[in-house]
Image: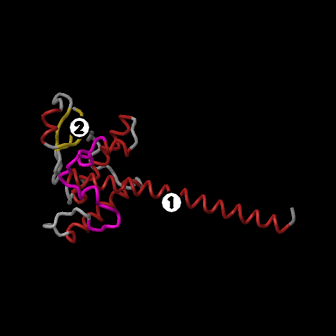
Amino acid sequence: MNRRDQHWMIITAFAFAAILITMICTSARSARTDMSIILARSCVGEAGWNAVETGECASIWHIYLKRSRIGGLTLRRATHVYSAALKSHSTHRRPWLMQLSRDGLRPKEWPSRASWKVYRDRWMLTVAEADRFVAKQLDDPTPDALHFGGWLDRHRLDKKVWEPYRPEGYRNTLYRRR
């Protein structure tokens, strides 16, 4: 093998390594992005459009994280199992929820009576907050909470085990072990 061939082999090896590193980094970024969107959709579906400001999104996401550790699940799986808002129904009452995306474009099935301009900034704020959570830059505002839910959950949970409480501004009731 002559010197010119050796140079081309080295250049080819570096190019291949650069492509491989780019693919790995892009894949990791896509996984983070996907998880952020799943979490943001869940937050809007479970707690509404103002839940970032109240801290309820952070509480819900940290509950998913705690539940994933308890159940030995990935965060993605625990979020899908736990979030009623993300459950697929043959006729979802809010089909636009699953169409919310990182680019902030108006969902195809967004209700015609609601202005997307009003909600877009709230959505983008929720996505940014989800990115912070995925990057482990968001503290748990309710470290003792292990469950959250609405009126239905109050009736099915064992009151001897779970103590309900609701931080100010939260839509959902949180539950901690007694």
Which quadrant: the C terminus? top left
Determine if the magenta segment contains residue 147: no
Give the residue furthest to the top: 160
115 shown above or below 82:
below
- At 39% from the left and 55% from the top, the residue drawn is 34
Q: CA distance from mark 1 to mark 2?
A: 39 Å
Q: Where does label 2 land, which residue?
A: 176
The majority secondary structure of the magenta stretch comes to loop
- At 36% from the left and 34% from the top, the residue drawn is 71
Q: Secondary structure at mark 2?
A: strand
Determine if the magenta segment contains residue 82: yes
- At label 2, the amino acid type is Arg
Q: Where does label 1 land, which residue?
A: 26
152 shown above or below 96:
above
Which quadrant: the N terminus? bottom right
* Location of residue 75 (image quadrant): top left
- At label 1, the amino acid type is Thr
Magenta residues, as a range? 81-106
Dot 2: few (<14), some (14–19), or many (≥20) neighbours within 10 Å? some
